[in-house]
Image: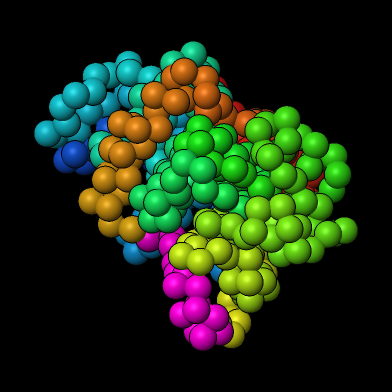
Amino acid sequence: MRAIMLHESGDPDVLTLTEVDDPSAGPGEVVVDIAASAVNRADLLQRQGHYPPPPGASDILGLECSGTIAELGEGVTGWEVGDQVCALLTSGGYAEKVAVPVGQLLPVPGEVELVAAAALPEVACTVWSNLVMTARLAEDETLLVHGGAGGIGTHAIQVGKALGATVAVTVGSDERAERCRRLGADLAINYREQDFVEVVKAEYGGADVILDNMGARYLERNVDTLTDGGRLVVIGMQGGRKAELDLGKMLRKRASVTATALRSRSLEQKAAIVEDVRERLWPLVEQGVVQPVIGEAFPLARASDAHRALEEGGVFGKVLLTVR
C-alpha cells in the first residue's frame, strides 16, 4: 500500500509517499480501507521531532480516518466487512489501509459523507472527553474555547451550544470571529486586539469551563478568567510548557486545572471514550446539530502542502487528506 512516511524530522518536505507492507488485523482489530484522514497539530509536532508515537505504534502519521472495513480480526463482533466507519487512531492514518482496535471504531453518522467523516473522530473524542467527561460542562454555564477557528474549536463551539452553554472563543482575526459567530459562538474575541480576560469577565463574570490549547502562556490569565468553582482543561502547549500557578488564587476560587492527552491513553480508556461519544454525542451528529467543519482537503500525495496549510494558520476547521 501507499503511505506517507517520515524518515527524518524537519519541514513539511520530509514527508514522502512510499510503498509499505499492508497491515493485517490482529485479535480484536479490523483493517480499514481508508477513504480519508485528517491533519492534526500533533502530526506537525511529530514531523518536527517533538512528539514521537507511543511504543509499539506505527511510524506512519495520522490520528484519525474514515473508510470501509476490509478485514475482521479474531474475536471481532458487531461489525462486518463493508461497513463504513471512522476511527480514532494512535497512528497510521496517512495511508491506504490501517489496522484499528475495534473499541476505537465509530459508524459513519447520519447523512455525513464518508470522506467528511474523517474530520470527526479525533475532535469528537477530544472535545467530548474534556468538556463533558472531565470538566462536566453543564447547561447555562459559560465555556471559553481558545483557538475557536481550528478543528477542536469549531467542534467545541457546536458541542457547547448543544449542551446549552454560553460559548465564547478567542480567534486571530475579525473574519474568523465572524465565522465562529455564524457557527454558534455567542462571543468571539480577537485576541490581537482585545484582552480575553477583561472581555469574558465583563460579559459573563468569567468562564465556568475553559478549553485551552496554549498552555503556559495563558495559564495565569485563564485562572484569572475562571469563576468560583471553574474548571480549566489544558489540551495543548502551543504557548509553552512551564508557568507559575498561583495556588492561593486557585484555593479562593475552589478552581481546578487538568491537563489531558488522548493519544497516550490505554486501549481501554480510549474505548470508554469512544463508547460514550457513540452513545451521547453521535445522536447530535446524526441529527445535524453537530457537524464536521472542513476547511481544506488535499490528496494523500500532497501531505506536505496540507501540513503547510495548517501551520500557516489560515484554515477554518479541519484539514483533510483524501485517499480514495
Residue at 62 percent of width and 60 percent of height? 206
Q: Quadrant of the C terminus?
A: top right
From the top left corner, tell me how far across and down residue 145 is, in percent. Answer: 62, 52
Q: Is residue 297 above or below residue 112?
A: below
Looking at the rendering, the stretch of residues picked out in magenta corresponds to 246-264
From the top left corner, tell me how far across and down residue 141 is, in percent. Answer: 52, 48
From the top left corner, tell me how far across and down residue 251 is, in percent. Answer: 46, 80
Residue at 71 percent of width and 52 percent of height? 203
Q: Is residue 65 left or right of residue 318?
A: left
Residue 82: quadrant of the picture: top left
Question: Farthest residue in the left direction?
Answer: 75
54 within the magenta span: no
Residue 212: quadrant of the picture: bottom right
Residue at 79 percent of width and 41 percent of height? 176
Colour scheme? rainbow
Q: Is residue 273 above or below residue 83?
A: below
Q: Nearer the viewer, residue 21 or 276?
A: 276
Q: Is residue 213 left or right of residue 272?
A: right
Residue at 62 percent of width and 31 percent of height? 293
Q: Is residue 119 left or right of residue 59?
A: right
260 within the magenta span: yes
Residue 33 shows up from this direction: no
